[in-house]
Image (tube, rainbow, N blue to C red):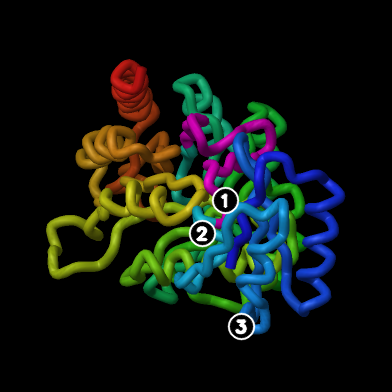
Amino acid sequence: MIAVLKPGATEQQIQSLADWIRSQGLTVHLSTGRYQTIVGLVGDTTRIDEDLLGSLSYVETVKRISEPFKSANRKFHPDNSVIRAGDTLVGDGHFAVIAGPCSVESEEQVAEIARAVKQSGATMLRGGAFKPRTSPYDFQGLKADGIEILLHAKRETGLPIVSEIMNANHLPMFEEVDVIQVGARNMQNFELLKELGKTQKTILLKRGLAATLKEFLMSAEYIMAGGNENVILCERGIRTFETYTRNTLDLSAVPVLHELSHLPVIVDPSHATGSAKLVEPMALAAAAAGADGLMIEVHNDPVHAMCDGAQSLTPEQFDKTMRHVRLVLDAITDIEH
């Protein structure tokens, strides 16, 4: 349930209403926009008299939200959220580009890639220290050593770092990581999501291999229900009958998620397609579709990469892609104005 307040509502009235809602055993979500304040009531709202709430002099309208996701819902928060990662902003016109290797392999490798992607315009550095692999015999990552290598690259370049977590017990190792990534396989690891909800870390949540958009948003809700509203959604393709590409990139998810939720939405064309030659066209399409950013795998020697070399761009290819992405973004800006 949400209560839309009149423009003249005072801070005292808002606080009094919030206190009353909490006294009913509910959680309060306040969203102060440019034109109005929305008070969200989260929990069992059947005990709330809708007419009584609507009769308050400073309440304009009262609406019930039928969707099961509440905090992630645009009705709760009409304005686009802007999420911070270090000094980088994501959402509402702030276009973020996360680039780097699938796996952290060595300090020299990460440092070289970090310098290159920053020069080409990347705003964040990605790198897998813990790697979920289909085969137990494949490279599983450098773990804590990998985190240290990423932190070294962060200190050298100033780029915020993004890395995937596999287990809530690893959280202490991620204290200096700017963005904690939850991979597709863990999208519905609800115990992990609840633990991340207790932090104030920025969380990059990837869509599951066969997850509906509703399920995707419900996973975001698990994090936000714990009090952490710093969530970025990432569309990375879903599994379909098509085998030519690694997954099927669902670009329609971008406008649909923007319609349903206020959270930023970025696109990962590398994992979606599994092919370096398809990364640029899908990156351009994602930018045209209104994505708030991109996540692109870059490796200085893809042929000898320890994982996912086939989908990784070289620094030179990434630079070219970035130049073309900027042209698309400029064209969109011109159309909007």
Q: Quadrant of residue 248?
A: bottom left
Q: For the residues marked 2 and 1, what is the alpha-carbon distance in whole angstroms?
A: 7 Å
Q: Quadrant of the N terminus?
A: bottom right
Q: Secondary structure at mark 3?
A: helix
Q: Is residue 96 left or right of residue 166?
A: left
Q: Nearer the viewer, residue 293 or 17?
A: 17
Q: Main secondary structure of the magenta part?
A: loop
Q: Secondary structure at mark 1?
A: loop
Q: Residue at x 54, y 31 (%)?
A: 123
The residue labelled by disc 3 is 46
The reply to whether dot 2 and dot 1 touch (C-beta < 8 Å) is yes
Task: Mark 2: give few (<14), some (14-19) or many (20+) Cα within 10 Å.
Answer: many
Give the image location of residue 42, x and y in percent.
65, 71
Q: Nearer the viewer, residue 172 or 285?
A: 285
Q: Which residues are magenta?
A: 76-97
Picture disc at residue 278: none
Q: For the residues marked 3 and 2, what is the alpha-carbon distance in whole angstroms?
A: 19 Å
Picture disc at residue 77: 1
Q: Quadrant of the C terminus?
A: top left
Q: Is residue 153 above or below residue 136?
A: above
Please name the amino acid that badge 2 sits on: Asn
Front of the two marks 3 and 2: 3
